Amino acid sequence: MVDCMPIIKQTFGEAVSRILKEKQWSYRRAKIATGIDHYTIGEMAAGAVPKRGVVIEWAQALKEPINPWLALAGYDPIPPELVEGEKHPGFTDYIVDGVHISIHESMGQVSEEKLEYIAKLVKDDEVWARAKEREKEEDT
């Protein structure tokens, strides 16, 4: 039994299908190129909108601007200064699994594994709940 129906956006599906055709990619070849599961790519080509992070991964893998893909999928854009680079001195910006991370140069070089761990923490509801509890304790 399906809990919920996916959001279908025909223009999103058409855009994904166009890319697949232009690059002559099967779903499995697209998985190798993008890191996105071939089943998900097939659903995307049919117009099913995946999570925001997957849309961002898709755009990044294609080396295309992120916001047009987010718009096609019906998501709000990422603020241009975070994407197109109003750079802040000493900071390097990353987008990992749909999470924007800025790292100051004083932190040294950050491995891909650490960035993935940071993104996972940012998305972890328990981490946010504990942080909110600490904030409440500090306020009292």
Image (spheres, grey):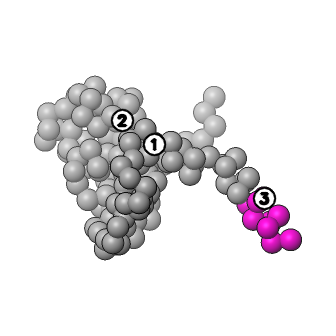
Which residue was labeled with disc 2? 36
Give me the disc on residue 133: 3
The answer to whether the residue labelled 2 contacts the one labelled 3, judged by CB atoms less than 8 Å apart, is no
Residue 97 among those drawn in magenta: no
Residue 136 among those drawn in magenta: yes
* Kind of residue sitting beneath label 1: Lys
The kind of secondary structure the magenta stretch mainly shows is helix
* Kind of residue sitting beneath label 2: Ile
What residue is drawn where x is 67% and y is 49%? Answer: 127
The mark nearer the N terminus, 3 or 1, is 1
What residue is drawn where x is 29% and y is 37%? Answer: 34
- Is residue 102 or residue 98 the one in the foreground? 102
**Hey, which residue is sitting farthest right in the picture?**
140
Which quadrant of the figure contains the N terminus?
A: top right
Task: Count the numbered circles shown.
Answer: 3
* Kind of residue sitting beneath label 3: Glu
Label 1 crowding class (10 Å Cα cut-off): few <14, some 14-19, many 20+?
few
Which residue was labeled with disc 1? 114
Label 2 crowding class (10 Å Cα cut-off): few <14, some 14-19, many 20+?
some
3 vs 64, left or right, is right
